[in-house]
Image (cartoon, rainbow, N blue to C red):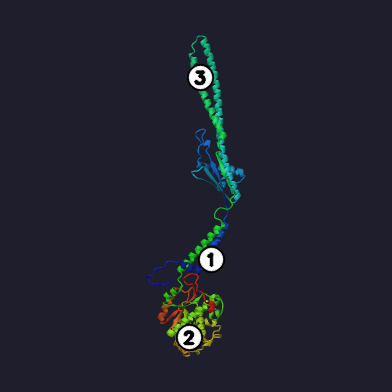
Amino acid sequence: MMYQSNQYIPEAARLEDYLQAIRLRKWLVLALTLLGLLGAFLFATSRQPTYTAETTVLLRGSPSESRIPGQDAAPNLEREREILLSNEVAERVLGALSIDASPEDLRTNLEVEFRPDSDVLNVNYTSSAANSAALTANTFAQEYVSLREGQATAYLGSLAESLTTDIEELQTALADNSARLAELWDERGDVVAADGNPADLDAAIAVETSSASSLTNQLRNAEAELRSVEQKQNSRLPAAEILRGATAPASPDGIGLPILMTAGLLLGLIAGVVAAFLLERLDTTARDDEDVAAALGTSVIGAVPTLGLGSRVGTGSLIMLSSGGSARFAAAREAFRRLRSSVQFLNSSSGVSSIIVTSSAPAEGKSLTAANLAIALAQNGSRVVIVSADLRRPTLERMFAMEAARHGLSDYLAHAAELNAEKVPGIDNLWLIRSGTPPDNPGELLSSDRFEQMIKELERENVEYIVIDTPPVLSTADALSAARFVDGVIVVVDTERTETADLLQVKTDLERSGSKLLGAVMNRQRFERGGLFRRDRYAYHQATG
């Protein structure tokens, strides 16, 4: 993160910022993407597949629902839905399918839907088997249709039977009436023959005649209604019928495996990109040249790409002695050559010859940088002495495959031995001053006048460059103690480890000690802004490797 003034306004995230975050944390993005894919696969394979089959039932008016004889009332879909979901229909289905279960259990997987503006019921049944779902859905529809049709048929049959009974009773009553009229007419004839008054008989005949007329009308109406009912029985459409029977579903319910896998892949990828971007935004390490320049107040004079683990320890870390190799090795060699050019410019412009190479914390690449810089300078024909001044944890000896000497820098600084610069085998123009016997007071030795005397003595021997490897600045005071005797300090910055706050502290400490900061070297440099692909990235490796 770059440090600027309080007037700094955070820059909006750009596409290249997302690409940078993805590139730097590609393994996190890949891991979360694979995790999303795996989660979708496990979810898809662990769930119990279910199948839902649908049957469509058309309802028509039923005479049993009409208050007007001979007319069919429109079906009440809500009521019919409840009938279809009732235990009565479920028990009929259980009997038809010979299933040993309770009606409640069977109805659990049944769903009936309808649209208010239609006369159609959709019967859906869900089962763990596709054929079972289709069979049960069809059976529910069939049993409901059978029930509804049976109700309509039974109603019309009952009505016809009732009308037939009424007709028979009317016919009997009419026959009785006819018999009484015949008797009354006979009696009236006798009365008239005997010159009697038939008034009473005429009144009785009138009553019976009126009754006969009423019975005749009732009989006609009943016969007409019976004919209407019989016609209804013969011509009416079914009260319900199956429009579309259910077929076995070809695929289970829910989202299919390909879609789930695609969704899991996309969600994992999105989560990875978001996580990478958030981590990048929250990252307080010195990520690029701007961060380092803002924190240290100096420019970056070298940048070394990330190397493999085997190239960070022992003789494998001497990149300048390797030949061929991958493009990354070629880039690293070019990086140290550019660093050599920067140091040579400082030497010609400011007379810089003695240089401390240090870092803010351990394991940030200071010894690797010091060794390869010294080799690069020596390969250019300059007389170079590299000093193993990290007396607490000397590293250069292992890198140059030279065992720690019995007498070295610590012994010289303690007035226990003479200064001994040994020729590094296989490298012209390069000498090494080993760390020597591990001392109890390395800070005091490096801050002594004896250390300054060593620098001057080497310069009198026509040594053109003195490269000194010291402990990290924030770990001990050793580097600060020695820094006041040299021409300048180079700080190695690990883009994956070094915190910007630590660099600010390094700058403060070096300024307090009166040291001159020559520049910074970016170790394990991240890719530069401007995209994932740079045309000049490894353009000349074959020519310069």
- Are circles 3 and 2 on residues that touch, CB within 8 Å? no
Hey, what amino acid is under mark 3? Thr
Residue 135 makes an appearance in the image: yes
Could you tell me which quadrant the N terminus lies in?
A: bottom left
Hey, what amino acid is under mark 2? Tyr
**Residue 305, image x, y percentages:** 51, 75
Mark 2, other Cα within 10 Å: few <14 / some 14–19 / many ≥20: many
Residue 180 vertical position relative to residue 402 in the rendered view, above or below: above
Q: Residue 465 carries which label?
A: 2
Q: Residue 387 carries which label?
A: none
The residue at which mark 1 appears reads as 31
Local secondary structure at mark 1? helix
**Residue 268, image x, y percentages:** 52, 62
Residue 154 vertical position relative to residue 362 in the rendered view, above or below: above
The residue at which mark 3 appears reads as 209
Local secondary structure at mark 3? helix
Q: Which residue is drawn at 50% across and 43% down?
A: 118
Report how far apart the C-alphas of labels 2 and 1 lie in the structure. Answer: 47 Å
Local secondary structure at mark 2? strand
Residue 437 makes an appearance in the image: no
- Are circles 1 and 3 on residues that touch, CB within 8 Å? no
**Viewer-closest of 103 and 142:** 142
**Viewer-closest of 297 and 365:** 297
Q: Which residue lies furthest to the left in this view?
A: 7
**Viewer-closest of 543 and 200:** 543
Report how far apart the C-alphas of labels 1 and 3 lie in the structure. Answer: 105 Å
